[in-house]
Amino acid sequence: MDKMSLADYMSALDTRAKGQFKRVQTEVMIQCPEAELVMSYGMPTFKYKGKVIIHFGAFSDHMSLFPGAGPVEELADKLADFKTSKGTIQFTQKQPVSDELLSEIVSISVARARS
């Protein structure tokens, strides 16, 4: 089975998912301009010196951030209104992650990748 390229993945996203991805990308690049965007586990993934900062996934009925267990645990109270599991945060267009919360998620993820 061929691996999907980043360009193929991005072209397959609908407008809402592309918009959410751009929000994540912008926040990561503000906090970690050295971040690299690659495909990993079939998803767009931001890495810093080979360490994962965050994965982004778009699905038919939701989108997910995969920052790892640390940020999800640290922000559990603020994520109470979202479906979460170990290392995963699900959100929808109707219930997006706020800019402030996204910034916190990325900040924790970047700090972990840099440590």
Image (cartoon, rainbow, N blue to C red):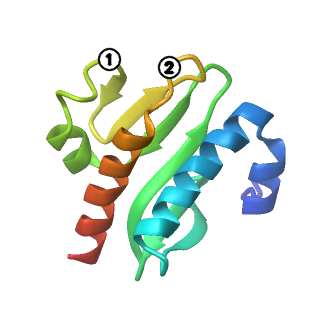
As drawn, the label of residue 81 is: 1
Nearest the eye: 77 or 46 = 77
Residue at mark 2 to residue at mark 1: CA–CA distance: 9 Å
Write the residue at 53% across / 51% down: 24
Q: Amino acid at mark 2?
A: Gln
For residue 66, side relative to residue 59 (left or right): left
Write the residue at 63% across / 19% down: 61
Determine whether 18 is above or below 28 in the image.
Answer: above
- Residue 92 falls in image quadrant: top right
For label 1, count other residues whose C-alpha is less than 10 Å away and answer few (under 14), some (14-19) or many (20+): few
Write the residue at 35% across / 40% down: 101
As drawn, the label of residue 95 is: 2
As drawn, the label of residue 34 is: none
Q: Position of residue 10 (x, y in %)?
A: 76, 51
Q: Position of residue 113 (x, y in %)?
A: 30, 70
Q: Secondary structure at mark 2?
A: loop
Nearest the eye: 49 or 2 = 49
Q: Amino acid at mark 1?
A: Asp
> Mark 2 touching mark 1, by CB under 8 A?
yes
- Residue 110 falls in image quadrant: bottom left
